């Protein structure tokens, strides 16, 4: 029997529009409906999408109702960026709206990433501590995702940053693409050392052990595989997560131009079925 709780399975549905940040109300409503029709009970919402549609003239209440009317929860909102600069005033301005969207939807945690190719550890620690403070004021958690091509390239560096920031509401996103492709490959020893409650979210997708070109970021945003179709050791990873007592949000995130060609409904269904299979649901 799988240790994964069904209610924790949601869809990162931004890939259903190819990862576009600026979307119309029609586009957002389409991917919300596709998520529900595929069988998901919730979504990982890009705050950019909510803010873009509201900025285009649709009320916040209407946008939220698109989710609620389809029975979709929003336990996690993405994405906090720019915080690694350590500029506290800029963090307030840039990340505040994302926190407000999370609060509006009743989310549990907000995900963040580092986009810079290099980071200053002291500045990033200060920035992450600021995010923790802003989240704590709203009763939220913050989970950080590492990206192999950035200044926060692997699980070990991401976990150290979380520890250095020193707040109990901080955790991690484990994206299985980045898990396999991080420098040195899967870091089982570090993952085993992390308390399970610090793994806020697992983003599920797949890839090959060796990249298809020189641009890892572009490959990650356009050529991910469905869970189970690549080289990720699902049994091994899931066993460690169960061992440490993790109970995360499970959020497949499959950026794929090939899958996108079939349209959002077909793409969402394929993601749903592949994810349930690797999770044993």
Image: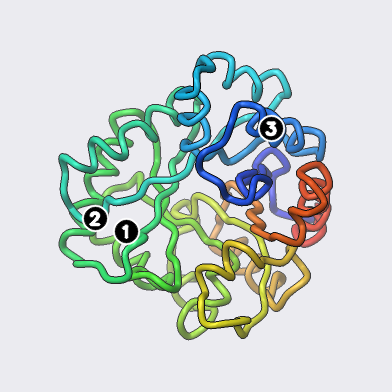
Q: Nearer the viewer, mark 3 or mark 1?
A: 3
- Quarter of image, res 94: top left
Which label was assigned to residue 255? none
x and y, in percent, of residue 212 in the image: 63, 81
Q: How many neighbours does mark 1 have within 10 angstroms: few (below 14), some (14-19), or many (20 or more)?
A: many
Quarter of the picture containing the N terminus is bottom right
Please name the residue shown 68% across and 68% down the image: 206
Left or right: 2 with respect to 94? Answer: right
| Residue with the mark numbered 1 | 162
Color scheme of the displayed model: rainbow
| Residue with the mark numbered 2 | 165
User: Cα distance, mark 3 to mark 2?
Assistant: 35 Å
User: Cα distance, mark 2 to mark 1?
Assistant: 5 Å
Left or right: 166 with respect to 45? Answer: left
Secondary structure of residue under mark 3: helix
First reached walking from the N terminus: tag 3 or tag 2: 3
- Residue nearest the observer in this picture, 3 or 80: 80
Q: Is 276 above or below relative to 61?
A: below
Q: Nearer the viewer, mark 3 or mark 2?
A: 3
x and y, in percent, of residue 27 in the image: 66, 33
Left or right: 187 with respect to 15? Answer: left
- Residue nearest the observer in this picture, 53 or 76: 53
Does the CB distance between marks 2 and 1 fall below 8 Å? yes
Secondary structure of residue under mark 1: helix
x and y, in percent, of residue 243 in the image: 59, 65
Q: Is residue 209 visible?
A: yes
- Residue nearest the observer in this picture, 109 or 70: 70
| Residue with the mark numbered 3 | 32
Does the CB distance between marks 3 and 2 fall below 8 Å? no
Please name the residue shown 40% across and 50% down the image: 112
């Amino acid at each position: 029997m799988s240790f994964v709780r069904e209610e924790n399975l949601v869809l990162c549905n931004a890939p259903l529009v190819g990862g576009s940040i600026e979307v119309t109300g029609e586009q957002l409503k389409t991917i919300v409906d596709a998520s529900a029709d595929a069988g998901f009970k919730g979504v990982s919402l890009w705050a950019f999408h909510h803010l873009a549609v509201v900025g285009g003239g649709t009320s916040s209440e209407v946008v939220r109702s698109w989710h609620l009317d389809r029975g979709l929860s929003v336990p996690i909102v993405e994405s906090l960026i720019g915080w690694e600069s350590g500029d506290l005033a800029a963090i307030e301005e840039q990340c505040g709206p994302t926190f407000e969207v999370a609060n509006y939807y009743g989310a549990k945690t907000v995900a963040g990433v580092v986009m810079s190719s290099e980071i200053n550890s002291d500045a990033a620690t200060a920035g992450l501590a600021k995010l923790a403070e802003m989240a704590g004021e709203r009763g939220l958690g913050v989970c950080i995702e590492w990206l192999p091509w950035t200044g926060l390239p692997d699980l070990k560096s991401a976990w150290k940053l979380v520890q250095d920031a020193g707040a109990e509401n901080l955790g991690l996103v484990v994206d299985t693409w980045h898990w396999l492709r991080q420098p040195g490959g899967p870091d089982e020893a570090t993952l085993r050392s992390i308390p399970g409650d610090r793994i806020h979210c697992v983003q599920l997708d797949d890839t090959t052990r060796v990249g298809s070109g020189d641009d890892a970021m572009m490959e990650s945003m356009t050529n991910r595989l469905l869970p189970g179709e690549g080289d990720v050791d699902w049994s091994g990873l899931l066993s460690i997560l169960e061992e440490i007592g993790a109970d995360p949000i499970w959020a497949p995130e499959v950026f794929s131009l090939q899958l996108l060609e079939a349209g959002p409904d077909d793409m969402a269904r394929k993601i749903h079925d592949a994810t349930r299979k690797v999770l044993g649901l």
